[in-house]
Image: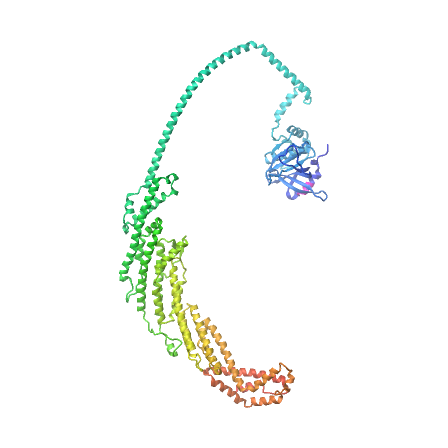
Amino acid sequence: MARSSADDFELRRACEVAIDAAITKQKVVLSIRVAKSRGVWGKGGKLGRQMAKPRVLALTTKTKGPKIKAFLRVLKESGAGGVLEPAKIYKLKHLSKVEVMQNDPSGCTFMLGFDNLRSQSVAPPQWTMRNKGDRNRILLCILNMNKEILGRLPKVVGIDIVEMALWAKENNTAVSSQVIIHGGQDASGLIQGHSQVTVERDLVSQAEEEDMEALLGTYVMGIGEAEAFSERLKRELLALEAANVHALVECESIIEEVLQGLEAASTCVEDMDEWLGIFNVKLRHMREDIESIESRNNKLELQSVSNKALIEELDKLLERFQIPEEYEACLTGDYFDEANVHKNVEVCEWLTGALHNLEASNLDPCYARMRGIKEKRAELVLLKCTFVCRASEFLRNYFPSLVDQMMNDKSLFSQRGQLKRPDHADLRYKCRTYARLLMHIKTLDKNCLAPLRKAFCHSLNLLLRREAREFANELRGSTKVANTKPILWLEGPISACQGANADSSSVSEAYSKMLTFFIPLLVDESAFFAHFMCFDVAALASDTTTSSTQPMMVPQGNSAAELAILNECLKELLTGLEEDFYSIVDWAYKIDPLCCITMHGITERYLSADKADTSGFVHLLLDDLETRISMLFSRFVDDACYSVEKYERGRQTGVLPCIQRFAILASRMEQYTQGQSRDLVDQAYTKIVSIMFVALEKAAQVDPKYSDIVLLENYAAFQNSLYDLANVVPTLAKFYHQASESYEQACLRHVSMVIYIHFEKLFQFARRIEELMHTIPPEEIPFQIGMSKVDLRKMLKSSLSGLDKIINAMYRKLQKNITAQELLPSLWDKCKKEFLEKYGSFVQLVAKIYVNETVPSVAEMRDALAST
């Protein structure tokens, strides 16, 4: 017999190297060469096998603490040198079936079924061994490892049990020779101690096997003499049958007596059977009668129980239908005064609950189809409509009556000499009495709220407009103003403008007082209306009685349609109030237009609060006020710009008076600003100063001869007048720098013109030299017509003779034309500096072209200028 590959220790070492046993910590229990093929499930009689591939199966174990894991590894030989490399690994804990293929006559082909394969539709591989010994060896090892390590056995199909047992017994030594330690127990112990495995039919036990051997040992012949043993068994069987027949023949008389007795007993049995049939018929009829009686009794009992349950259910249903007597009068009467409000709320709660209980969704389907239920619901709906209509009519009349009482009480409004702050605490208290009733009315019929809201808005609007009108009239009448004559800031004499310092802060205070009293009131009224009239809003900060801060309101689940209705109601509630606020704004503007700055700042403070749904129209009112204030202030700015444009454009003045008046106006505007309305004031500055600079440029063009003088005098005046304000106001600082640049340019042009007038020949000669240097070399210039050294000497003699007189003439020229004499020193310094720069350039040209010619140096000229 050829040596099995299971005994090949070289193969085992190659497997250990392939699986890298040192790293994976797996020990090889058994390694054997097989041929792998793949069959087709469900095809009997034929083995649909692909080409067989050589593989090595290795059973390995891994110890992890007290646990042992078992694996079946498949290895294949690589193309280079036949080195083994891992191809597949299976965990034995997932082995569910071991099947020896019946269509392989050799019995050496088997399949291993695992329950964790991803695709169960693909047949598992078939493993073909070299002989049955190798097959038995690996299958016994697999089964023993499953039982010993996992404590269970897979299903085994197609194995000859006797053959397996005999082979395990005969080859115990061969199997035990492969010793691999498994937690202190070797593989031979696993195989030897558990050679009996569970298959489709159990093997005989050890005791049965011993009894069988003892029985067989009583015979002389051995178990191996099967034919002789079979002949002996046949002879003994024939002898036993013959003995039985002989015994029967000897007992014939006894048998006849027994037969006679049996006949008599049969007759008795037949008679008994006939009587029993008769009794059975009678009993069957009696049983049918009893069953009929029991059925009728059961039906009557069931009917009685059902009738009792039905009466109880009908009683409960009648209780739900029944209208309490104390509620019926309220539902049909007109008892809506304050004393009966609590009773009416209870009625609404009961009616709401009754209607809810009679909803089809809250009733059993069999009840919902009952005519009585439908009629009762129709009755309750009619009562609901009657109650809601009467309650709505009462409240529509109640709200105007409350407002009429307040309108008739003149002590509640501002009067001459007495400024009255509006107080609606009592009105709200009386309205809150009916708040819960309104909520229930909305639950019963939300469509009835529209007329109620309209009546409430109309009545409260009349009260608010009356209070605002009386308050505004008294506010204007009680405010003392020193001067009511309009001030023309950029027109008239400067002294009048400077005297316009009358304190108009009381006007701004009047406007602030108007907003302080009424804006929180309007916000509170809007919020109260939203809650009282059952809009889905909630106040997050409702403490506005001691603060002018507006409460922030947020919507609580209200839809766009709900918000639209709320906005329409608030519009109707507050419409017309803006006229009284406009009257205060217009009155303040007529007294002092600069009050618009303060009023704009006050309005901005209120607008800076967070907007909310219920105070949205109050913010719209403030937006309109801010727009009107801005419009009036823009009108004032436009008038100021017009005053600048129409100002007389005199040669010596330009717009000087306007500049001085604007400085006074800007100082006053900054007093009104006080850190607020910065944008409004900056826009006014930008517009007025831009128009002023444009008018200045136009005024300078009236007489081009003196245009630079007009410009430099006006720009200097602008800088002098607004120096302090430009240091703190960025917008004026920008125009200050613009005026400074324009002043420098005008000074430079005027000084150049004065220098050119008195030294015309000198600088014309220098300009001709510069022009010729662009076309010819410098050394050829002295040979040009009019450019010789003689010509240079003549020009210097005529231009520089009497230099002191010429310099004095230049100074007198500057002094003669300028009006603002305080500018003369700086202007004369600029003139001397500009002349020295131009003369220095001339000296450099002469030194470059006329090498040997001498001209007065720059130092000499500086000394001459300094002596004047």
Q: Is residue 491 above or below residue 335?
A: below
Percent across and percent down for residue 805 are 52, 89
Taking the spot 56% from the left edge, 82% from the top edge, the residue there is: 837
Q: Residue at x 49, y 87 (%)?
A: 812
Range of residues picked out in magenta: 14-19
Name the side, left or right, on which 713 lies relative to 79.
Answer: left
Q: Nearer the viewer, residue 180 or 239?
A: 239
Instruction: Count the marks.
Output: 0
Residue at the extreme top:
253
Eyeballing the image, is 547 above or below 338?
below
Q: Residue at x 34, y 38 (%)?
A: 316
In the rendered image, residue 18, in percent from the top left (x then y), is placed at 68, 43
> Is 760 or 825 nearer to us in this picture?
760
- Residue 135 in sight here: yes
Asked if one can make out residue 180 in the rendered structure from this viewpoint, the answer is: no
Vertical placement of residue 612 versus 203, above or below: below
> Left or right: where does residue 156 sit relative to residue 365?
right
Dominant secondary structure, magenta: helix
Q: Nearer the viewer, residue 74 or 692?
A: 692
Q: Pick the quarter of the image with the N terminus.
A: top right
Q: Quadrant of residue 20?
A: top right
Q: Quadrant of residue 134?
A: top right
- What is the basis of the colouring in this image? rainbow
Q: Is residue 683 magenta?
A: no
Q: Is residue 140 above or below residue 716?
A: above
List x then y, in percent, for residue 492.
38, 78
Membership of 18 in magenta stretch: yes
Tell me residue 750's x, y (percent): 51, 82
